[in-house]
Image (tube, grey):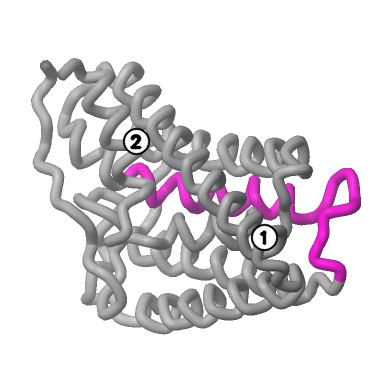
Amino acid sequence: MSNFGLFFQTGIEHITDLNGIDHILFVTALCLRYAVSDWRKLLILVTAFTIGHSITLALSTLNILVFSRDWTEFLIAVTILITAISNLSNREHTVNRKMPLLYLLALVFGLIHGLGFSSLLKSMLGKDENIIVELLAFNLGLEVGQLCIVAVILFLSFIFIRILRRNKREVIVFVSGAIAALALQMMIERIPVSKDQHSNEKTVYSGGYYHPGFCSAGPEYPQQSRL
């Protein structure tokens, strides 16, 4: 497999890995209000998130931006909780405005998630200097995986609301409440309180998101030599 294919496949697997469900929970909370008919608004939302995580993914991978791994993981949990709460606080449970606050949140939160994405990529690249192709392939893999997650969310939403005739408000409240509870648990477990526990570690580690006590860190990926 070529470098492009390897990193593209790894990007898909990383974002859809159930052993590190942070991103899946976030995308679910982010897209929960939308229906298939809202695809234009959903496209803007996903694009905003993509722009955000692409910026910090590149900056972190190139070591232009260095941020504590502990704080990255804690803040990722915060983004999930805030997004879930925003669904609960929206009484209409729809997206009627042309530029809702959710778009801005997606962009800002994408910056935080990009730092988490960079961890696996940096561990695979090792000391390679020419990483443009690998960076592009990994990012495209993330996007394909992300679109798969969005498609599953829309499909399940269609089944529950259109076919099973469940109340949309009740579905959003139930799912958002469950996500908020999980995110709160993540936050509590990830509070960076001890300086002697990973305090000097930056966003360079293998596997999925670090989540002690909730899920495993994901599959280990050894450093790959250039093919």
Q: Amino acid at mark 1?
A: Ile
Circle on res. 61? 2
Prevalent SS, magenta region: helix
Residue at image position (38%, 47%) is: 15
- Name the kind of residue labelled 2 in the image: Thr
Which residue has dot 1 on it? 163
- State which quadrant residue 90 falls in: bottom right
Residue at (73, 48) in percent of width and height: 103
Q: Nearer the viewer, residue 175 or 119?
A: 175
Structural crowding at the residue carrying mark 2, measured as other residues with C-alpha within 10 Å and reported as few (<14), some (14–19) or many (≥20): many
Q: CA distance from mark 1 to mark 2?
A: 44 Å
Residue 227 in percent (x, y) is at 11, 16
Q: Position of residue 1 (x, y in %)?
A: 15, 19
Q: Is residue 100 magenta?
A: yes
Instruction: Tell me which segment is drawn in magenta.
Output: 92-118
Q: Image height check: is 114 above or below 102?
A: above
* Residue at the image point whose x is 34% and y is 35% from the top: 61
Depth order, front residue of 52/143: 143
- The x, y position of residue 124, in whole percent, is 19, 36
Q: Is residue 23 above or below residue 127?
A: below
**Image-based side of 42 in relation to 159, left or right:** right
169 falls in the magenta region: no
- The answer to which quarter of the image holds residue 30 is bottom right
Dot placed on the residue nearer the N-terminal end, 1 or 2: 2
Q: Check disc 2 and report its element: helix, strand or loop.
A: helix
Task: Determine whether 73 is above or below 132 in the image.
Answer: below
